[in-house]
Image (cartoon, grey):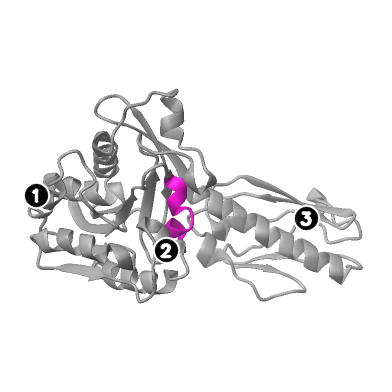
Amino acid sequence: TLSLHPYRGFELAPLLEGHLKPPIWIRALALSESANFFLFGTSVRQFRIMGDFGTGFRANSTSARWAKSAESLKVVSRGETNRMNLRIVTTLLVVLILSTVHAQRQQEVKIEAADGVKVFGTLYLAQKELPIILLFHQADANRGEYQDVAPGLVELGFNALAIDQRSGGTLFDRRNKTVARLRGTTGYTYDDALLDLEAAVAWAEREGYKTVIVWGSSYSAALVFLLAADHPVVAGVLSFSPGEYLTDTHEVTVAASKVTVPVFITSSRFEAEDAKAILDAVASEDKVQFTPEGFGAHGSSALSSGDEAEYWQAVRAFLARWKD
């Protein structure tokens, strides 16, 4: 437990345990005064803070307090403490620590597809032994489509990997790094991007994830059925606004007819009929179609739309299949 005196009340150990990689140097500014903290140890319960709550509130090794018990760490005020400054610094310290945790729970990942194309992505970490959801974006887009979705999945108890496919662009105010590294190479179709999805599945297998769930948006919502049909490791499918978007206009329904794992399909309200055509082809008996009461939105953007609450409710209910 990390506690700061005289202001008690926040305990960060349950949140930080296993996520911080020491040593970490934190410098915070409170009004005109500075506060320096040096955190180190192999786990949260072994962290120590070196600091002096004096008028200047500066790091001072001679004033470091070493707790004899590894279960508790206290930063104790010395001398006359300015309560306002202490409160500000305490707040800044918490923000900085949480920012560090956030950064360390996200990792840049580079994967090589079967044809040698380098595929870039972001791994959102919960716990390694938990299922992983592979997140694939829509046309002209990138992993930014999931920048708000993936943290929500982590909160639900899932790891997540969002990639930049070779067929993509700059939607969601973010560059597609895979496309950028191809240095303007054009001509990649939706069909070609299947190699990137397969590379993500192979990566998840190599990394030792036991449960792999795939999630597609728009054109990738079609590709995930090909992926699930050909890769037995895939344990479940979420498909946002699927359709026959590929060169072979029957390929998606044919692939869906071979999918026997749980399937969740959704779309905007006006796309529901096309989505149902895919759902009807799915071989699995465990299949769900969700149509919003509101207008909804195309692809995974639905989870950032005005109707996001009802979409999230449906997603949570489906993912409960993989919760203990």
Crowding at dot 3, Cα within 10 Å, few <14 / some 14-19 / many 20+, comes out as many
CB under 8 Å between discs 2 and 1: no
Q: Residue furthest front?
A: 270
Numbered disc in front, either 1 or 3: 1
**Per the image, is 144 magenta?**
yes
User: How far from the left and from the top, in percent, is residue 31?
Assistant: 87, 58
* Residue at position x 9%, y 67% in the image: 285
Crowding at dot 2, Cα within 10 Å, few <14 / some 14-19 / many 20+, comes out as many
Residue at numbered disc 2:
303
User: How far from the left and from the top, in percent, is residue 60?
Assistant: 82, 50
Marks 2 and 1, the one that precedes in the sequence:
1
Q: Which mark is residue 51?
A: 3
**Per the image, is 260 magenta?**
no
User: How far from the left and from the top, in percent, is residue 16?
Assistant: 53, 60
> Observer-nearest residue: 142 or 275?
275
Vertical position of residue 150 compared to residue 246: above or below: below
**Circle 2: element type:** helix
Q: Quarter of the image containing the C terminus?
A: bottom left
* Residue at position x 9%, y 49% in the image: 254
CB under 8 Å between discs 1 and 3: no
What amino acid type should be assigned to the residue bearing mark 1?
A: Val
Q: Which mark is residue 154?
A: none
What amino acid type should be assigned to the residue bearing mark 3?
A: Gly
Crowding at dot 1, Cα within 10 Å, few <14 / some 14-19 / many 20+, comes out as some
CB under 8 Å between discs 3 and 2: no
In this rendering, does residue 324 appear at all?
Answer: no
**Circle 3: element type:** loop
* Residue at position x 44%, y 23% in the image: 183
Residue at numbered disc 1:
254
Quarter of image, res 286: bottom left
User: How far from the left and from the top, in percent, is residue 129?
Assistant: 31, 56
Q: Magenta stretch?
A: 143-151
